[in-house]
Image: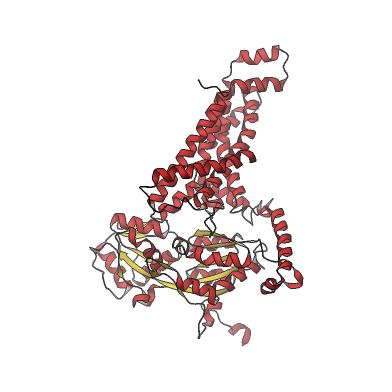
Amino acid sequence: MPIQRRKFLATVGTAATVGLAGCSSVLGSDEGGAGVVGETLTLTTTTSTYDTGLLDALNAPFEDMYGVTVDSVAQGTGAALETARNGNSDVIMVHARSLEDEFMRQGHGVNRRDLMFNDFVIVGPSEDPAGIEGMSSATEAFATIAESEAQFVSRGDNSGTHTKELSIWSAAGVEPGGDWYQETGQGMGAVLNIANEQGGYTLADRGTYLSQQSEIDLTILVQGPIEGGPELLANPYGVLAANPARHEDANYDLAMAYIGYITSPQGQQVIADYTANGEQLFFPRALSEDPNFQQYVPDGWSADESNE
Amino acid sequence: MVAVLAGLVPLADVLSVFVHAAAGPLFVEFPFESQYVTSIIYVSLYVSLSAVALSTLFSVPVALVVGFTDFPGERLVKAAINTGMGFPSVVVGLVVLFAVSNQGPLGELELVFTKEAMILSQFVLATPPITGIALAAVTGVQADVRDAAFALGGTRVDVALAVVKEARYGIATAVLAGFGRAISEVGSVLIVGGNIAGSDGVSKTRTLTTAVQLEARQGRYETALVLGAVLLVLVLAVNAVVVRFGDGGQMR
């Protein structure tokens, strides 16, 4: 039945596109081919963009503009990429560059763009039993927590935040484990609640923390780069399209329309304007006077083999 | 089925108003006025009732056949039914996800993250309890009822109908057990459905259970509690309807 629905929608979509000839040229439909009106874009993304409410704000204008539906599935970064690997996602919005690069190198993704950034913060109870408040180094703070064996709650879910957390432990030369270290396998919001209940520390993205701040007693003890903290705590988000050559079912046209929109001045403005509890959660990064070529290619990629 | 579902939308509205009125003083900003809750209730009922209806259509004939005929492997079938009652729902969700994934055997149908996929997984979950309990009810019907039906010149179908009529209370219990399993289930619908709601707040594959999970994840426990209460009310309402149906419309 969905196949028929798709065909039906494609037909209706084409008719609508012809009807809205002025708009249809925007979509770049060649020879009056299939438009995107009425189609559905499946976006797999992280819980942090979802739970903060940013996605609703970001998707509504896009859906209105193109007459389409965006199905947002909130998973961790690892799961979001895995869903796309299995061909069940058209576009992916995540925040773990190392995992994104791996995905790109494997040929599953194309047209990666830098989207926005926020940062990570180390939060914990205001009594701060390990004494990390105001430290300027994330690795030092983590090492101190490990040394004092203060409760630490980890995402443990292969998400972007979890990936970042593991890289900090590794930089701090600590193999986390033991009674004080808990892996929950849950989303950021849930982990903040658990840390709150247990008086533990955790690594949180600033966005989720701010949107939940009024309901928990945890405070920021080590700031990220937005407030002058270490660069190690930066949290850049990227957006990628599923490779249509690899995944035939991928709705590539609509995925690229979406990437075009969220990296456009309009989409970037929505990101800049989005606030929770009066604070800006995400900082747009797609538009830059000094575009970073590295955003389009996996880390460590070099053109040498083909050029020399 | 469609008519029933169409009738449920006003029911959802009534429930919303009712719960809103009850919860008003406690929870200030609950989004009942939006379509959010109504659409979640609709998706929950649509998915669970469809799955249970399909399960029932499948299970009752199976229970009749298994109950009234002797065939090799009968004990194996019964063992399979009993085992199926304990299927962990997340495992069912995972298997259904593999099946409907675009690279899976049913990938052509593009079912992943749809209500149809959720119905499929709930069908798998609800069928063993419905079959098992219906089987017990059917075999519990006195042999003389069957004999009488045969003696009166009934065909096999007539006998089956007589037995079903006699066992209707037990079958209603079976349907309720299946419905209870389906509507209260989180794991598989989360995996195969994706817990999707549009940016306009209309649920596509978000059910009451996955909504409760989402709200709890975000620390909005009040909203989660109210949604949980709505779920309870729904289960109670459906129970009341089915029990009356099982009584043949007579209150005893």
In the rendered image, which quarter is residue B161 located in? top right
Going by the image, does A21 lie left or right of A135? right
Farthest residue to the bottom: give it: A308
* A82 shown above or below B51: below
Task: Please state if B114 lies on the left or on the right of A275 as rendered.
Answer: right
* Residue A117 x/y as whole percent: 45, 73
Question: Could you tell me how many numbered marks the image carries?
Answer: 0
- The answer, for residue B119, to whether it is visible in the render is yes
Q: Position of residue B138 (x, y in %)?
A: 59, 23
Compared with A10, A29 (above or below) is below
Percent across and percent down for residue B177 are: 52, 33
Describe residue A135's horizontal placement relative to residue A294 as left or right.
left
- Residue closest to the eye, A282 or B25: B25
Residue B50 visible in rendering: no
Q: Quadrant of the C terminus of chain A?
A: bottom right
Nearer to us in this view, A131 or B10: B10
Residue B178, quarter of the rendered image: top right
Q: Using residue A261 as the reference point, say whether residue B219 is left or right of it.
A: left
**Which sits in the foreground, A58 or A168?**
A58
Residue farthest to the right, as pictured: A31
- Give the residue at x 56% y 67%: A61
Vertical order, A59 against A28 (above or below): above
Instruction: Please say which color scheme the image uses.
Output: secondary structure
Q: Residue shown at 48%/77% (left/top)?
A: A285
